[in-house]
Image: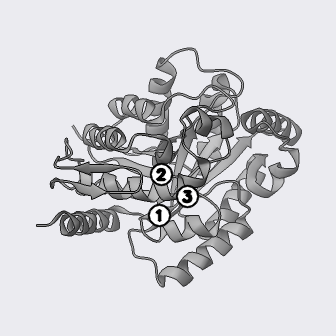
Amino acid sequence: MPPTMAIIATMANTEKRMSEAAPGQRLGILTGSWPLGMPPDGGFYRDLARQVEDLGYDLLFHGDHLFMYNPNPDALMVLSHMAACTRRVLLGTGVLLPALREPAVMAKQIATLDYLAGGRLVLGVGVGGEVEQEWAAMQVPRETRGARTDEYLELMRQLWSGETVAHQGRFRSVAGVRGTPSPYQPGGPPVWVGGRGGASLRRATRHQGWIPYAMSPRRVREGVTALKAMMGAPPAHFRIGYVLFAYVDEDEAHAKEMAGRVLGKRYAQDFDKLLGPICAIGTPAQVAARVQEYREAGVQDIIIIPQAPAEEYPQQIERLARVLGVRAPRAHPQ
């Protein structure tokens, strides 16, 4: 079978599996950069992964930047560690920036991670661009990031196909090799596209999901409407996700103060005016109401990034589970 046909066939198999396995609404947790300082050691991620799974969350994601404003561990390395600590929860990148990475090496790392995780990987991707210095450090022109992302995703699909690769691209050419190991999921993990603009929506229609952040429920609803206009009725495997900044506390003023401090340092800008429109910050009732607004806007997978220092993360995860009705799963089968 020619490589292109093999890719189509394996993607169809992946889509069928995702369609069969995809429930309606799910909740997850995301970790990323640490504006107020890194966790003390790697045991933090082991304990957090187990906590997230034991509480009953559905997804566990990690963000990606090579050079962020704050300390930020490598997403694929962290998720590999988390894969070894969990058995049920879906793992994902929220979001990986393919244009900053060498695509053949990246394809092998992702395939290996999906293999190690038993097919529990979701590949969230984005074009990035907001942190100028990381593009300069990697000698990648920012104006090429969209085209590079598209080409690298195409190349990675070929490397995950099990067939001999014959890729002649604008940025990278790979020929005469087969990618190994094969991902656990035939054709590779489902790809969810991050971003808020029209280009990201168009890119998402070529993959398996859309996962924006920093948008109001109204803007998310507009994005969902635009996707439906582009795709007609989205296929069953297609997921709408959203990365939600959150902090819950009985004291609304304390919640806003803490979240504003963390977000301001995370993105090196004043976030006080944005806490209301794009976040779930405040009392349990306020946080639950905001999550419901995103549900009503069409979001299936809400992935929460608590705006808390590392030492408060476990507490916030537990509080959010109670507030949002996360239920612990049944015991794992032996």
| Residue 100 placement (x, y as % from top left) | 50, 41
| Residue 186 placement (x, y as % from top left) | 22, 56
Q: Are marks 2 and 3 in contact (CB under 8 Å)?
A: yes
Report the amino acid beneath label 2.
Gly
Residue annotated with mark 2: 124
Residue sitting at the far top: 40
Element assignment for label 3: loop
Question: Which of pointers 1 and 2 lies earlier in the amino acid sequence?
Answer: 2
Residue at figure coordinates x 26%, y 69% from the top left: 12
| Residue 121 placement (x, y as % from top left) | 36, 47
Q: Residues within 10 Å of mark 1 (few under 14, many from 20)?
A: many
Q: Residues within 10 Å of mark 2 (few under 14, many from 20)?
A: many
**79 relative to 298, above or below:** above
Q: Which numbered disc covers residue 322? A: none
Q: Nearer the viewer, residue 108 or 236?
A: 108
Q: Residues within 10 Å of mark 3 (few under 14, many from 20)?
A: many
Q: Which numbered disc covers residue 211? A: 3
Question: Which of pointers 2 and 3 lies earlier in the amino acid sequence?
Answer: 2
Left or right, 32 with respect to 250, comes to left
Report the amino acid beneath label 3.
Ile
Q: Nearer the viewer, residue 3 or 43?
A: 3
Query: Residue 57, can we see it?
Result: no
Q: Are marks 1 and 2 in contact (CB under 8 Å)?
A: yes
**280 relative to 38, above or below:** below
Report the amino acid beneath label 1.
Gly
Q: Are marks 3 and 1 in contact (CB under 8 Å)?
A: yes
Quick one: quadrant of the N terminus? bottom left
**310 relative to 267, above or below:** above
Distance between the alpha carbons at the discs numbered 1 and 2: 8 Å
Q: Quadrant of residue 319?
A: top right
Residue annotated with mark 1: 209
Query: Residue 179, can we see it?
Result: yes
